[in-house]
Image: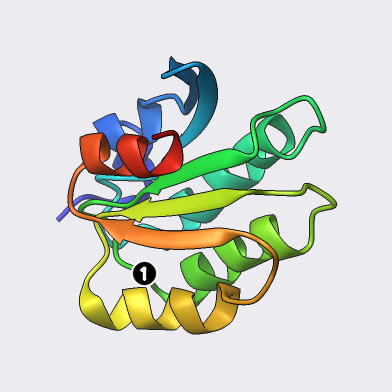
Amino acid sequence: MISKGQATDLPGYKKASFLLYYNGGEIWFEHLEDLYDHDDLVVKKLQADTPSFIKPSSPAFVCFVLFETAITDAVFLAVKKAVLESNKRFLKIAFCGLGRKDQRRFQKALVNHGFGIAFFDGLEEAKMWLLP
């Protein structure tokens, strides 16, 4: 078991989120994977990254990468807040690494807000859906 102090040493916490140029456009990849049950770190990392992907000049295509990260209520609410409480106009949002239960939860919370939403098992599939 990893203690809270050691958790910031997790590769998932150190992995930077980034902008990827793909197929003539840009996608923001929000890397929140490999943080297991350390929801405090997921929320902290997301809060630190959110200003980067909600700027008007940031891409309207976002992929949340959540492999090996537990989707607790805190994580769910932080993602929902980052997406819905910003003034950013998203066109499509992809999620990678979610189980069926979490997919249904995000689908229910984010549907009918003016952007497409889809769930994938791999990043390549997500990229092709975001920018075909």
Can you give x and y, in whole percent of width and height, for residue 71 in the image? 36, 69
Q: Nearer the viewer, residue 29 or 73?
A: 29
Q: Which residue is mark 1?
A: 71
- Rendering coords of residue 120 (x, y %): 25, 55
| Number of numbered discs visible in the structure rendering | 1
Q: Secondary structure at mark 1?
A: loop
Q: Is residue 112 above or below residue 33?
A: below
Question: For the residue carrying disc 1, how many other residues have a C-alpha within 10 Å: few (<14), some (14-19), or many (20+)?
Answer: many
Left or right of 132: which side holds 53? right
Quarter the N terminus occupies: bottom left
Q: Residue at x 50, y 16 (%)?
A: 24
Can you say whether 52 is above or below 3 in the image? Answer: above
Q: How is the image coloured?
A: rainbow
Q: Residue at x 36, y 57 (%)?
A: 38
Q: Is residue 129 above or below residue 40?
A: above
Please tell me in which quadrant of the rendered image residue 123 appears.
top left
Please identify the quadrant where the C terminus is shown.
Answer: top left
Q: Quadrant of residue 54?
A: top right
- Who is closer to the viewer here, 127 or 50? 127
Q: Is residue 108 above or below residue 76?
A: below
In the rendered image, the residue lying farthest to the front is: 132
Question: Which amino acid lies under the numbered mark 1 shown in the image of this protein?
Answer: Ile
Q: Which residue: 46% across, 77% down?
A: 107
One can see residue 10 in this view: no
Q: Is residue 122 left or right of residue 77?
A: left
Rendered residue at 85%/52% (across/down): 87
